[in-house]
């Protein structure tokens, strides 16, 4: 399988299995008229490829929506490493807990503050 085929297939799988929390953040971004791409592939090194939950190209920002398993010690460590790798290649990362995505006002305020809008 060619790499582009793999990327497209994996991205489609991730989009198909997106969470309600990711969908809510995207709805708010649409309301705020902020362009975004979902499950955006980002290569941080020759061997590391990440799919960002949501990418804001105008701001070069990655939005990650973290479910419950992100609060287990090992996953926290992996998320910190992922954020550092993304920062090294020029991206800024904002994270939402699933619980934060149930209130539109929280999403709007957090995005506005992070992007300095």
Image (cartoon, grey):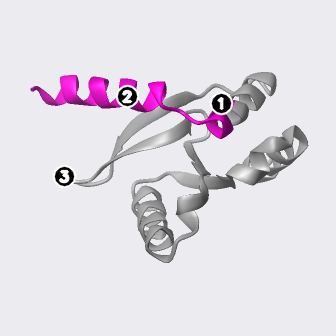
Q: Are there few (<14), some (14-19), or many (20+) residues within 10 Å of tag 1?
A: some
Rendered image: mark on residue 23: 1
In this picture, residue 30 sits left or right of residue 15? right
Query: Residue, x 61% and y 40% (percent of image)?
Result: 59
Could you tell me if residue 87 is visible in this image?
Answer: yes
Direction right: furthest residue = 105
Q: Are marks 2 and 1 in contact (CB under 8 Å)?
A: no
Residue 67 pos. (x, y %): 59, 53
C-alpha span from label 2 to label 1? 15 Å
Residue 55 pos. (x, y %): 54, 37
Question: Would you place residue 8 above or below residue 39 in this image?
Answer: above
The quadrant in which the N terminus is found is: top left
Q: Name the residue that disc number 2 marks.
A: 13
Residue 68 pos. (x, y %): 60, 59
Q: Secondary structure at mark 1?
A: helix
In this picture, residue 35 sits left or right of residue 14? right
Q: Are there few (<14), some (14-19), or many (20+) residues within 10 Å of tag 2?
A: few
């Amino acid at each position: 399988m060619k790499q582009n085929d793999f990327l497209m297939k994996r991205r489609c799988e991730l989009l198909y299995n997106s969470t309600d929390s990711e969908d809510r953040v995207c709805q708010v971004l649409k309301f705020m008229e902020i362009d975004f791409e979902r499950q955006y592939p980002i290569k941080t090194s020759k061997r590391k490829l990440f799919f960002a939950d949501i990418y804001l190209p105008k701001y070069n920002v990655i939005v990650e929506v973290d479910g419950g398993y992100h609060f287990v010690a090992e996953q926290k460590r992996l998320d910190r490493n992922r954020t550092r790798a993304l920062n090294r290649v020029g991206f800024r990362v904002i994270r939402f807990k699933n619980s934060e995505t149930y209130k539109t006002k929280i999403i709007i305020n957090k995005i506005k503050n992070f992007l300095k809008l």
